[in-house]
Image: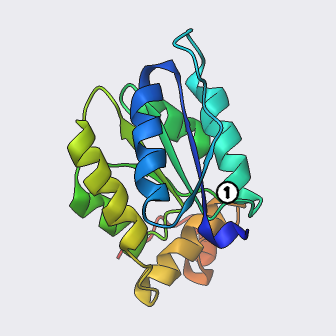
Amino acid sequence: MTAANRIVLSSDHTAIRLRQAIAAHIASHGWVAVDIGPTTAESSHYPEHGEAAARLVASGDCRFGIILCGTGQGIMMAANKVKGIRCGVCVDTFSARMIRQHNDANMLSIGVRVVGEGLVLDIVDAFLTAEFEGGRHATRVEMIRALEEQRPLSPEASDRQSSGSQGRLR
């Protein structure tokens, strides 16, 4: 089993049933679901679950991560604090495709109180079947990496910072 076909799933206590439905769905499409989320409805803390899933993706143990909480926002914020993670909250299939195609997202976050199960599975499929387009988008993803590493975004950005000029964004 390689990381190329592994997807880590996690959630807080609000999304156990939906997380399990996603696990079954992706398994039926040939993916290996690595479910690390809670198994009881006892209250749990989404930052811990977002971080744990993000660390498995960032380390290369899993190719992608799918995380869930009430709105998808809090768990996404926690996951994005892990170096190398690009996670977006999606409530529609267009956004799920775009975060893969344009942002090379490696994690998807979904709000269980926002989106119903049928649409969630479509969102998951859109995310998993989309491929990063590269090109101009690769430049922008590299800029995100630069921010993460606290490097200048580009040589032009470095020049603007050192001269005190704000410059114009393109």
Query: Which part of the image, by quadrant, shows the C terminus?
Result: bottom left
Pick whichever, 153 or 91, lies toward us.
91
Q: How is the image coloured?
A: rainbow
User: Is residue 18 positioned above or below 131 on the image?
Assistant: above
User: Is residue 159 positioned above or below 108 on the image?
Assistant: below
Pick whichever, 155 or 64, lies toward us.
64
- In the rendered image, residue 166, in percent from the top left (x then y), is placed at 47, 64
Pick whichever, 118 or 67, lies toward us.
118
> Farthest front residue?
28
* Badge 1 density bin: few <14, some 14–19, many ≥20, Cα 10 Å: many
- In the rendered image, residue 44, in percent from the top left (x then y), is placed at 59, 16
In the displayed structure image, the side of residue 135 where residue 40 appears, left or right: right
- In the rendered image, residue 121, in percent from the top left (x then y), is placed at 31, 50
Residue at screen point 32% across, 68% down? 98
- In the rendered image, residue 120, in percent from the top left (x then y), is placed at 29, 46
Residue at screen point 72% across, 52% down? 56
Query: Which part of the image, by quadrant, shows the N terminus?
Result: bottom right
In the displayed structure image, the side of residue 148 where residue 59 appears, left or right: right
User: Is residue 89 positioned above or below 94 on the image?
Assistant: above
Res 110 seen here = yes
Q: What number of labels is visible?
A: 1
> Farthest bottom residue?
135
User: Which image quadrant is residue 99 in?
Assistant: bottom left
Quickly name the residue at label 1: 57
User: Which image quadrant is residue 46 in?
Assistant: top right
Question: Which secondary structure, mark 1?
Answer: helix
In the displayed structure image, the side of residue 15 where residue 112 appears, left or right: left
Res 169 seen here = no
Of the residues shown, which amino acid type is indicated by label 1?
Answer: Val
Residue at screen point 60% across, 32% down? 37
Residue at screen point 62% across, 82% down? 155
